[in-house]
Image (tube, rainbow, N blue to C red):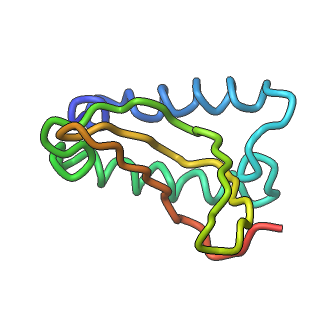
Amino acid sequence: MRALAAGGLLEEAFSRVEEEWKGRPNPPFFLRRPDWPHRRRRVLRLLARAFEDDEQFLKGDAEIVAVEEAFARAAPELGGLEVRGTIDRLERRSGSHFYLDYKLGSTFPE
C-alpha cells in the first residue's frame, strides 16, 4: 500500500475508480456534489496518510471481502425497523466479519 501512495499510483488508481463510478446509472452521492473537486484533494491526502502505515489500513490477517456493499435487515431491537444502506468496506479478520464505514464529510445525507 505504501508503494502505491509513494509512487504516485494512488491518484491514478483513484481516478480510474472515480471514472468507473461516474459511469454507473446511479453514481455515489459524493461524486455528484458541486464541491467534489475540492473534497477530492482532501480525500486523496487522507488516503495517502492512511497508506503510510500498512497496519493502520489493513490490520493483521484482514482480507477485504467487498467494498460499497449494500445491506438491508430488520432490527428486532428497534421494533422490526428495517435498516438499510451501503457499507464502505467489509473485511474478514480472524474468522469474523467487520463492517467499516468511513466518515469524511461534515454534512448529513439527504
Quarter of the figure with the C terminus: bottom right
> Can you give x and y, in whole percent of width and height, for residue 89 in the image?
46, 43
**Residue 45 position by quadrant:** bottom left
Instruction: Tell me if 67 is positioned left or right of 46 in this view.
Output: right
Quarter of the figure with the N terminus: top left
How many numbered tags mark residues here? 0
Q: Residue at x 28, y 43 (%)?
A: 96
> Can you give x and y, in whole percent of width and height, for residue 60 in the image?
13, 41
**Residue 4 position by quadrant:** top left
Instruction: Tell me if 45 is positioned left or right of 58 in this view.
Output: right
Q: Residue at x 22, y 30 (%)?
A: 3
Question: Where 68 sits versus 34, above or below?
Answer: above
Q: Residue at x 49, y 56 (%)?
A: 101
> Can you give x and y, in whole percent of width and height, for residue 9 in the image?
38, 27
Q: Nearer the viewer, residue 107 or 98?
A: 98
Instruction: Tell me if 66 is positioned left or right of 18 in this view.
Output: left
**Residue 33 position by quadrant:** bottom right
> Can you give x and y, in whole percent of width and height, for residue 87 in the image?
56, 48
Q: Nearer the viewer, residue 89 or 6?
A: 89
Instruction: Tell me if 43 is positioned left or right of 52 in this view.
Output: right
Question: Where 67 sits versus 47, above or below?
Answer: above
